[in-house]
Image (tube, grey):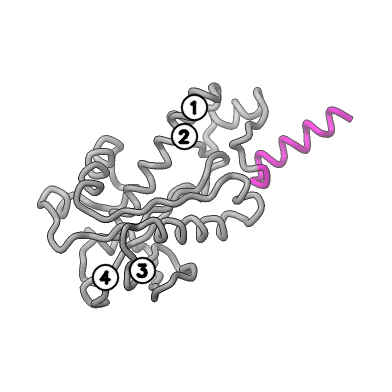
Amino acid sequence: MPDRRLEKTLGALVCGVDEAGRGPLAGPVVAAAVILPARLPRGLSSGIDDSKKLARERREALHAGILECCAVGVGEASVAEIDRLNILHAAMLAMQRAVAALPQPPGHVIVDGDRAPTFACAATAVVAGDARCLSVAAASIVAKVTRDRFMIARAAEFPGYGWEKNMGYGTAEHLAGLKRLGPTPLHRAHFAPVAQLELALAGAAE
């Protein structure tokens, strides 16, 4: 389970940062930054974990609790920015925006992964940080829930791709919908299945 050992060694006001949505074929990449209070309610401190390990209902409940007692910032990079910058740089941009959206500036940032973007303060990248650091795990929950809600809402606008279930990832249902209906404005044009389909459609039109 993640804990606060690293946060405590850093000494400064620490925020954890994580993102959701690097791999999907559609939708933005969303990042969250979370500063934990000195003391968390017991249900939160014992329940927060890497969002990928949690059932959807549990994530939703923890998300509500995190927003109630933590300082939270959320940022995203759009599909257009993903296609222009590439997904890595877009994810870094979303992280910077999440930290900038915090109600107070942190003194140190812990980022999930092997690299961190540039912030106004010091930053530490921690591989598997969402499984090791409590603030990063909390950020992973906020990022995941925020992005999932966005994709579920867009599923009603763009039916047939199964986004309400796959959240834009390249499942069989999503790929079948993409082949049948074509890409939407929320599809990432430079991701291989979308790019291949657009090339095929362009060839058929010639």
Residue for badge 3: 109
Marks 3, 4: nearer the viewer: 4
Is 202 part of what is drawn in magenta? yes
Name which of mark 3 and mark 1 comes first in the sequence.
3
Residue behind mark 2:
151
Left or right of residue 151: residue 190: right
User: Quick check: 53 left or right of 177?
Assistant: left
Does dot 2 land on a helix, a strand or a loop?
Answer: helix
Quadrant housing the N terminus: bottom left
- 2 vs 4, front mark: 4
Identify the residue position indicated by label 4 in the image. 13
Disc 4 packing (10 Å; few <14; some 14–19; many ≥20): some
Q: Are marks 1 and 2 in contact (CB under 8 Å)?
A: yes
Q: Is 96 on the left-hand or right-hand side of 142?
A: right
Q: Secondary structure at mark 4?
A: loop
Measured from the top left, where is residue 21 in percent x and y?
Answer: 48, 47
Type of amino acid under label 2: Met
Amino acid type, label 4: Leu
Going from the N terminus, do you reach mark 2 or mark 4 first? 4
CA distance for labels 2 and 3: 28 Å
Disc 3 to disc 4, how far (Cα)?
9 Å
Label 3: which secondary element: strand
Residue 138 image point, x, y percent = 28, 54
Mark-to-mark CA distance, 2 and 4: 33 Å
Magenta range? 189-206
- Residue 155's disc is 1
Q: Is residue 106 above or below residue 141?
A: below
Q: Rounded to the nearest whole Å, what is the CA distance between mark 1 and mark 2?
A: 6 Å
Q: Residues within 10 Å of mark 3 (few under 14, many from 20)?
A: many
Q: Residues within 10 Å of mark 2 (few under 14, many from 20)?
A: many
How crowded pointer 1 is (Cα within 10 Å; few <14, some 14-19, many 20+) is rated as some
Mark toward the viewer: 1 or 4: 4
